[in-house]
Image: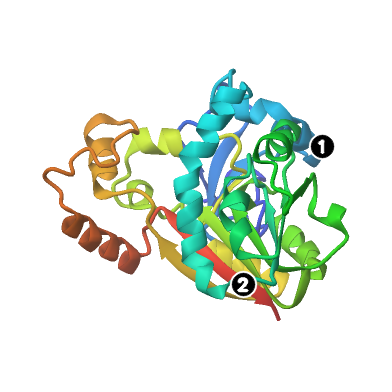
Amino acid sequence: MAEYNIKCTLCKSGEINPIHNKIRNITDDSSKMYECTTCGTHFLYPQPKDEELEDYYDGQFREEVHTSLYYDKAELNKVFNKFTFEANRRVARIENELQLSDEILEIGCSVGYFLDAIACKVNAVYGTEWDSRARLYIDEVIHNPKIKTSKNPQDFSKQFDKIFMFHVLEHIVDPVQFLVDLKPLLKEGGKLYIEVPNVDDILVKTFRCDAFKDYYYKKAHIYNFNEKSLQYIFNQSGYEYDIRFIQRYDISNHFYWLANGKPGGRGFYQNILSNQVNEEYVKSLVMAKQTDTLFAVIQAN
């Protein structure tokens, strides 16, 4: 059912439904979340402007989502150490596709945990980040001569063997055009790796956990994708692709959300729910396409 004259900001369909859950970090009615029944996207309306986002991501975003002390060096060290485990998992996922001669780019590299994790496996590492203080942390604290940073991908004036985007595409106002603009930056035969949250997450789609949905939908996520909406984006931007289903959080986390209505439950019930139970649960989520994360490997046609 269409509401007023609002159309999906991705596929332009008027077949949309309002989502009545809260949006994290929005305390008024200035923006709302809608579901497009045509392409499957959940989108924020109205959209912010690009220039507004540049200012937002250069400081305000991190302090708003994390803490006002985010840019204290000790806090940045905590962020780097916290996400190093995830960075290593991401490297392991694609390690057999890497070559020592590769020059790679990560778009939206935060404080550089993935850049640092992959640097020893390739020839050169580049990262872009709108957050100037995060770039400064990479340059001054990580201080790896193989790692170079800038604000935008085109700043380097070069092509790459592989480009990575982890939880970035959902922040982009025009994801189709963004991906089209990346094509000239890929070497012949180059690949683009994209990881995004999956809005068909079982806590959203099947369990319909309102506490989780109030936490899940956030101001910074202009879009919330599922397999169908990613297919639309990749088809429109002219890429060949393989979409995979990844589960980052365990069964304890889901039980904890359902029982307590808040995060913090990873491993909480591991004395009852064994690794084998979790492995079978994850297999079921993958089969149902209701994992928390989507991972796409794509290349230009």
Q: Residue at coordinates 54% horizontally, 66% vertically from top-left?
A: 296
The foreground one among 59 and 198 is 59
Q: Which quarter of the picture shows residue 89? A: bottom left
x, y (%) of residue 13? 63, 58
Q: Which residue is mark 2?
A: 298
Kind of residue sitting beneath label 2: Ile
Question: Tag 1's secondary structure?
Answer: helix
The foreground one among 109 and 19 is 109
As drawn, the label of residue 51 is 1
Count up the numbered dots. 2
Q: Residue at coordinates 76% horizontally, 34% vertically from top-left?
A: 132
Q: Is residue 226 visible?
A: no
Question: Tag 2's secondary structure?
Answer: strand
Q: Residue at coordinates 31% horizontally, 52% vertically from top-left?
A: 206
The foreground one among 14 and 68 is 68
- Could you tell whether 182 is left or right of 198 in the image? right
- Could you tell whether 83 is left or right of 147 in the image? left
Kind of residue sitting beneath label 1: Glu
Q: Residue furthest top?
A: 68
x, y (%) of residue 68? 59, 18
Q: Residues within 10 Å of mark 1 (few under 14, many from 20)?
A: few
Q: Is residue 250 above or below residue 24?
A: below
Q: Is residue 222 visible?
A: yes
Q: CA distance from mark 1 to mark 2?
A: 28 Å
x, y (%) of residue 111? 63, 39
Q: Residues within 10 Å of mark 2 (few under 14, many from 20)?
A: some
